[in-house]
Each structure stands twice: as structure tokens, then as C-alpha cells.
């Protein structure tokens, strides 16, 4: 019998939008090269691997190029699959053991709430190559523990029309860069895009982990603890953010798109 694998669109309520992730619920632990090879085969921004533990699930995330310490959309997709396929009761909180500590998810109406660590940035001036590659004039720059850069720019229009030099971005030592601005679109407080070519992801469609940084940043700027965000990739996605001390509650929706088996 093959290994079931499920593809989910996360941070969206419409098919073929948001951020796709593969979810693989393992019956037994696999080695790292096997998981990396599967993630490369799936060729999505993230593939999640789950293993049942006495309390909750072990969860690891792989891009096509490497394992990462924190991923929001593949966690959202994993919780969605566990509830949808009956591995967990819908009124049950799901606990994941990860490289970023214990993460929990719960259903609230049609939304999945994820309790994540805040990953605030600290003001820092990046190498000139980063700004040159983005082709923007920054209002603010900073970097966080995950080695993500945050770059605030002047407007939503500039952000939506951004066409970065991906080859030059690859030379910058970082996990990725989130470019952000206040939103002029009704219903959203801020808008962003996220580029991570060193991870094999030129532009990530919707990045939960980036909002662990963007949430605290815009909370300080806008003086609000509940924020509504839009990630303006070609696929697009909606993230609700609530800042709570050193935690960030990220909320999103998800849809199962595809089911299959790995015949290996």
C-alpha cells in the first residue's frame, strides 16, 4: 500500500489560490533524505510530515531545497487534514511538536487559529544588494531570529508592482525578505509579499511565519492588536493576526485540492 499524501490550499476559501502545501501523515518515522526527496518531488513551497506522538503530533516542514524551522501555511494545512480526515475531533485542540516549540491549532467557526511564537524584527541596515535587488526606497528595514528581513516601503501600489531581481536576491545571506506597506484595499490593515529564493521559493504565495514578524511590527505602528492582512502574490491569501505578548495568533482557512499515494 502506498503512502497517502494530500495537497491543501491554505489561507484561502477558494480553490487554486492561497498557498498550496502537501501533507504526509507517516505511519513510521522516515529519515531526512527521504523527506527531502519527497518535498523536492512535490515541488511546492512546503511539504509537511506528521507522525503521531503520545500527545499530539510531531511536525516537520521541508521546502524543495531544505528543512525550515517554522511554517504557517503547512501547519494550517496539517490541522485541516487531521480534522477533515477524522484523525482529530473538530472540537479538539491539536498540538504539534516542532523545531519552534509546541504549536497549537483549534477550529473557530470556518477559521483555523494557530498559536505561534512572535518573531519580532530589530532595526538593522541590510547589505546594499538586498535593496538593489528589490528596486525600492525603504522606509524601514529590520531582521529577526529566523534571518528574515522586513522592508517597509511607501505604498501598496509600489508593492504590488514589485519585480525583484531574483538572481541577485539569491546572493543575499537570509531565509527570505518580507516587503510590506499599509493597505489601501478596504478591509485590510497591511499588505505584504515574501521572497525566499535561497529556499527554492522565488515568491511564496502566503507566508504564515512572516506574519509572526509582520503582526508585531504593524501592531506597534498602527496601535492595534487585531489586524487583517493580505499577501499580494499572484495567488493571494488572507491572514488574520492577533498579537498577544510574545505569541501571535494566526487565523486562516483551507481547502483540500488533491489526494494521492506515493508508491515508494
Image (cartoon, rainbow, N blue to C red):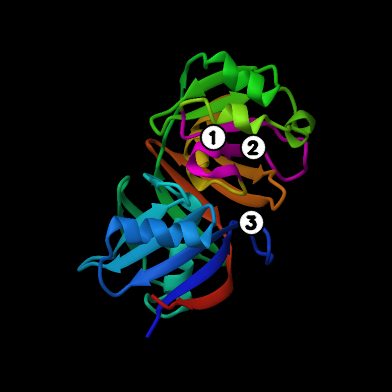
Q: Nearer the viewer, residue 149 or 101?
A: 149
Magenta range is: 174-203
SS for dot 1: helix
Q: As drawn, is 225 to the left or to the right of 104?
A: right
SS for dot 2: strand
**Between discs 1 and 3, the one toward the N terminus:** 3
**Between discs 2 and 3, the one toward the N terminus:** 3
Q: Nearer the viewer, residue 226 or 112?
A: 112
3D distance between C-alphas at marks 2 and 3: 14 Å
Q: Position of residue 262 (x, y in %)?
A: 44, 75
Image quarter where the N terminus lies is: bottom left
Residue 214 in view here: yes
Q: Position of residue 259 (x, y in %)?
A: 53, 77
SS for dot 3: loop
Residue bearing mark 3: 18
Label 1 close to label 2 by CB (< 8 Å)? yes
Residue bearing mark 1: 214
Q: Position of residue 246 (x, y in %)?
A: 37, 36
Amino acid at each position: 500500500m502506498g503512502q497517502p499524501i494530500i495537497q491543501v490550499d491554505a489561507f484561502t476559501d477558494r480553490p487554486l489560490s492561497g498557498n498550496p502545501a502537501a501533507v504526509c501523515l507517516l505511519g513510521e518515522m522516515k529519515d531526512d533524505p527521504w523527506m527531502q526527496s519527497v518535498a523536492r518531488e512535490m515541488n511546492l513551497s512546503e511539504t509537511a510530515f506528521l507522525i503521531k506522538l503520545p500527545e499530539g503530533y510531531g511536525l516537520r516542514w521541508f521546502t524543495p531545497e531544505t528543512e525550515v524551522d517554522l511554517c504557517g501555511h503547512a501547519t494550517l494545512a496539517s490541522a485541516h487534514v487531521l480534522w477533515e480526515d477524522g484523525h482529530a475531533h473538530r472540537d479538539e485542540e491539536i498540538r504539534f511538536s516542532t523545531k519552534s516549540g509546541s504549536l497549537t491549532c483549534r477550529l473557530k467557526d470556518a477559521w483555523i487559529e494557530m498559536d505561534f511564537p512572535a518573531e519580532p524584527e530589530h532595526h538593522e541596515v541590510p547589505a546594499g544588494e538586498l535593496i538593489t535587488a528589490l528596486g525600492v526606497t525603504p522606509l524601514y528595514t529590520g531582521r529577526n531570529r529566523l534571518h528574515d528581513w522586513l522592508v517597509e516601503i511607501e505604498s501598496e501600489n509600489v508593492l504590488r508592482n514589485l519585480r525583484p531581481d531574483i538572481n541577485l536576491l539569491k546572493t543575499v545571506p537570509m531565509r527570505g525578505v518580507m516587503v510590506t506597506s499599509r493597505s489601501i484595499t478596504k478591509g485590510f490593515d497591511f499588505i505584504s509579499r515574501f521572497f525566499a529564493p535561497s529556499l527554492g521559493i522565488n515568491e511564496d504565495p502566503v507566508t504564515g511565519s512572516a506574519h509572526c514578524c509582520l503582526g508585531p511590527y504593524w501592531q506597534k505602528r498602527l496601535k492595534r492588536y487585531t489586524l487583517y492582512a493580505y499577501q499580494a502574490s499572484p495567488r493571494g491569501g488572507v491572514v488574520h493576526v492577533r498579537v498577544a505578548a510574545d505569541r501571535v495568533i494566526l487565523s486562516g482557512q483551507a481547502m483540500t485540492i488533491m489526494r494521492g499515494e506515493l508508491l515508494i
